[in-house]
Image: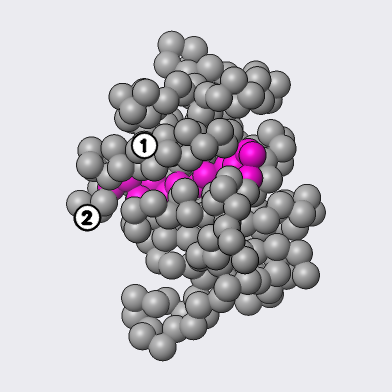
Amino acid sequence: MAAECPRYKRILLKLSGEALAGQQGYGIDPDIIRGIAQEVRDVVDLGVQVAIVIGGGNIFRGIAASSMGMDRASADYMGMLATVMNSLALQDALEKSNVITRVQSAIEMQEIAEPYIRRRAVRHLEKGRVVIFGAGTGNPFFTTDTAASLRAVEIGAEVILKATKVDGVFDADPKTSPNAVKFDTLTYLDVLKKGLQVMDSTATSLCMDNNLPIIVFNLTQNGNIKRVVCGESIGTTVKGG
């Protein structure tokens, strides 16, 4: 069956902070972020409404800091600030690619970002602007995966596109297990029961409760965001049974 282009009208793209670091493993790689911005622009040019949630693991990981003795809530707030830094970096790259962008933060910081207001976010999307949601949910003890699921449901996104460094979801780590088998489709319950590394259980449950599909795909291959949006069967799709 031929791929439709575009298959979706409104998507939420979930990027890990580590994806922005590239090979250096820390911080923001200018070439990587420019490449992501260009891919997002290609999708916007199709008329697709794009919202984005970015992690902060390339700068600071709250859960890692808390494991070394830092107060978990304080560590998580620091992680949220890291996501805002990544959001501003991506906004800059997108604007340089002639994509009109708005950053909305769950923690108010009016000098650099709008506060998160659902109706305003939807209006921006309707006008063709890319909306980047920073600072997670604004609450400690929740991951940016949960923030992505929550925002996707709130804005009425049709799908979450979770960008990773591998080709989808496998039954073992494909980097260390050469015989790892890739799943083409999974149910939410499969993910929860098998403890598969798709999204954390809170995020997966939220998607299950709202019948919101998740597509896990490889960001490192150029053009993959557009391929997913155009309905090509790449990566792993998580949906209801």
Residue 52 is situated, as x and y percent measured from the top left of the image, at 51, 38
Residue most extreme to the front: 2
Residue 69 is situated, as x and y percent measured from the top left of the image, at 41, 51
The answer to whether 111 is drawn above or below residue 74 in the figure is above
Q: CA distance from mark 2 to mark 1?
A: 18 Å
Which label was assigned to residue 100?
Answer: none
Q: Which residue is mark 2?
A: 23
Label 2 SS: helix
Label 2–label 1 contact, CB within 8 A: no
- Range drawn in magenta: 8-21
Q: Residue at x 77, y 54 (%)?
A: 211
Which sits in the foreground, 188 or 67? Answer: 188
Q: Residue at x 59, y 20 (%)?
A: 127
Sooner in the amino-acid sequence: mark 2 or mark 1:
2
Q: Which residue is mark 1?
A: 37
Residue 143 visible in the current orientation = no
* In the image, residue 13 lies in the stretch drawn in magenta: yes
| Amino acid type at mark 1 | Ala
Which sits in the foreground, 107 or 7? Answer: 7
Q: Residues within 10 Å of mark 1 (few under 14, many from 20)?
A: many
Q: Residue at x 47, y 80 (%)?
A: 172
Which sits in the foreground, 178 or 69? Answer: 178
